[in-house]
Amino acid sequence: MSKPELLQYVENLTQLPKYPSFKAGDTITVHYKIREGTKERVQQYQGVVLQRAGIGVTETFTVRKMSGNVGVERIFPIASPFIETIEINKKGVVRRARIFYLRGLTGKKARIKEKRIIKK
């Protein structure tokens, strides 16, 4: 088997976990398992989704949060076995699929408009 055939075979084997649909601009909480020696704990990482990239097994998403006065970004593979759950806290309204311009904004300028959900 050649390399592309092997990659296709692995992609067909792995089942992607079912997470809620989210996009750039949404504020999410990622529950991520961390192993330290023999102990295992779940750490929550909450921030704004900057982008989603890739397709299928190789898909990733970037989450940015402010820790003190410093912006921290983390890239998560969507097929990672260490992701326990993903919660959507807010749906954001943005016009772009990649909102890297958020890196240069601070304070009130860095706010993202929230999508209102109309309940009937």
Image: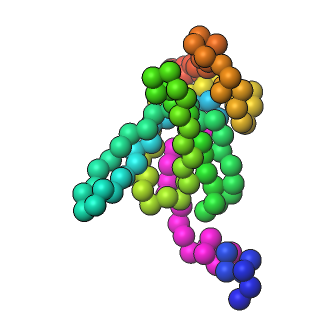
Q: Quadrant of the rendered structure where residue 9 is? A: bottom right
Q: Looking at the figure, which quarter contains the N terminus?
A: bottom right
> Please, is residue 114 above or below residue 81 in the view?
above
> Please, is residue 34 above or below residue 105 in the view?
below
> Is 84 in front, or is 73?
73
Name of the residue lying farthest toward the bottom: 1
User: Which residue is located at x 67 percent, y 75 percent?
Assistant: 7
- 52 relative to 70 in the view: left or right: right
Q: Position of residue 105 (x, y in %)?
A: 65, 19
Q: Position of residue 115 (x, y in %)?
A: 59, 21
Name of the residue lying farthest toward the left: 39
- Can residue 51 be spotted in the picture? yes
> Please, is residue 70 above or below residue 12 in the view?
above
User: Which residue is located at x 59 percent, y 35 percent?
Assistant: 49
- 20 relative to 45 in the view: left or right: right
- 51 relative to 86 in the view: left or right: right
User: Which residue is located at x 40 percent, y 44 percent?
Assistant: 31
Name of the residue lying farthest toward the top: 108
Magenta stretch, overall SS: loop
Instruction: Look at the image and say whether residue 17 sits in the magenta stretch.
Output: yes
Q: Position of residue 54 (x, y in %)?
A: 69, 54
The magenta-colored residue range is 8-23
> Is 93 in front, or is 43?
43
Q: Position of residue 59 (x, y in %)?
A: 63, 55
- 38 relative to 96 in the view: left or right: left
User: Which residue is located at x 50 percent, y 49 percent?
Assistant: 19
Badge count: 0
- Can residue 22 be spotted in the picture? no
